[in-house]
Amino acid sequence: GAVVSQHPSRVICKSGTSVKIECRSLDFQATTMFWYRQFPKQSLMLMATSNEGSKATYEQGVEKDKFLINHASLTLSTLTVTSAHPEDSSFYICSARVSGGGNTIYFGEGSWLTVV
Amino acid sequence: AQSVTQPDIHITVSEGASLELRCNYSYGATPYLFWYVQSPGQGLQLLLKYFSGDTLVQGIKGFEAEFKRSQSSFNLRKPSVHWSDAAEYFCAVGSYNTDKLIFGTGTRLQVFP
């Protein structure tokens, strides 16, 4: 089946620094990818929709200047958390829909971000 | 308002027992419904989905779910639970025109031997 890979799976960064998380569709093309955030023992909250070749669409309340999204190719989207703070520590998950493959959406394995 | 409700935060069953996880949704358009499973610290794995047609859908790992439009429900069932089924289960709803999924708060399943 389709695979979506995220890297890194775990990252620790210092407060004030930036960290980039990659989301790749390994065996299919994805014109659209999605970034979710999940706090411990809570549900997933959509942060933004990443569109290949255009600007991302952010959900209400999500700071676009803090969470930079780039979707440079049909198989890669990146989320950069800029000037990270401890409250940004969370589990970030991406998802992608198989282009032309119905509405099946596959999720990545997630990335744990800890800001110290 | 669009929402997904999973009334049961935590369910505990014995191995071999049957399981039903509840999911109710509120959605303005024709709903496309999903069940995902998440093991601790892991991403989400699709168990099954409903778009149209037969309202009883079969998924992986022996799971099935039934769409009941009149009750706005999409409950997940398994006739005999295995210890490896212990995980967090999320119900989600979307539409054909958007890939945005709205997730429920999840149900944590614990399985006793």
Image (cartoon, rainbow, N blue to C red):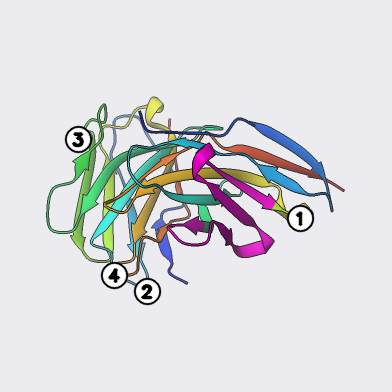
- Name the secondary structure under disc 3: loop
Query: The disc numbered 4 marks a residue on which chain?
Result: A
Q: Which residue is mark 2?
A: A27
Q: Which residue is mark 3?
A: A64
- Identified at 28% across, 67% down, the residue is A99
Q: Earlier in the sequence, mark 4 or mark 2?
A: 2
Q: Which segment is the magenta one? A: B49-77
Residue B80: in magenta span: no
Q: Is residue B52 visible?
A: yes
Residue closest to the eye, B10 or A24? B10
Q: Which residue is mark 1?
A: B79
Above or below, B24 relative to B64: above
- Identified at 34% across, 58% down, the residue is A96
Query: The disc numbered 3 marks a residue on which chain?
Result: A
Tell me the distance, in whole angstroms, between the alpha carbons under discs 2 and 1: 34 Å
Q: Earlier in the sequence, mark 3 or mark 2?
A: 2
- Name the secondary structure under disc 4: loop
Tell me the distance, in whole angstroms, between the alpha carbons under discs 3 and 4: 29 Å
Asked if disc 3 and disc 2 are in contact, CB closer than 8 Å, the reply is no
